[in-house]
Amino acid sequence: MKQENEILEVIYMSRKDFERINENPPNNSICISIRSRYDIPVMLSDKWDTGLKLCFDANLKATDLHGFSDEMADNTIKFALDNIKPTTEKLIIHCGEGKVRSPAIAMEIANMYYAQCNICKGYDENTFWTMRRAHRRLLGMN
């Protein structure tokens, strides 16, 4: 069953763009911060309604040591379900360049909520399908 949120917009962006808005995020917004194992974590401003931090490398299978694991996908889906409220206007997801990891997660969460999200060519298909499988598991659709 999909959740509905008529005002939710799911946005993905680069770390550089995220750092510009981090100290003054949009109202009614939550975030997901993605970094690789080589990056220094972003310190999330306490002005976000809430946030999730993930660390994984792009284009690796879920079974690879530094890939986006099934457990990470389950936690990301649960984070969305627990924290996206009817009043949440924006979910902002960032990764290094905003072109591979963050759009993969953004597209599945947008699908869960019938939300607006631009589709990006070149997104991380392993991450996208790991998210899709986690969502299906949660719904009992294995």
Image (tube, grey):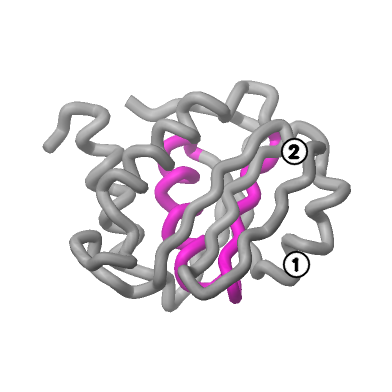
Give coordinates of residue 7: x percent, y percent.
Answer: 66, 33
Q: What stretch is highlighted in magenta?
A: 89-114
The reply, left or right, for residue 53 in relation to residue 124 is right
Give coordinates of residue 114: x percent, y percent.
Answer: 48, 38
Inspect this view and state whether residue 9 appears.
no
User: What quarter of the picture does the C terminus occupy?
Assistant: top left
> What amino acid type should be assigned to the residue bearing mark 1?
Asp
The reply, left or right, for residue 36 in relation to residue 13 is left
Inspect this view and state whether residue 79 appears.
yes
Label 1 to label 2, Cα distance in Å?
16 Å
Classed neighbour count for the residue bearing mark 1: other residues with Cα under 10 Å, few (<14), some (14–19), many (≥20): some
Judged from this view, the residue extending furthest toward the right is 24
* Circle on res. 17: 1
The reply, left or right, for residue 17 in relation to residue 6 is right
Q: What element carries label 1?
A: helix
> What amino acid type should be assigned to the residue bearing mark 2?
Trp
- Given contact means CB atoms under 8 Å apart, are the residues at marks 1 and 2 in contact? no
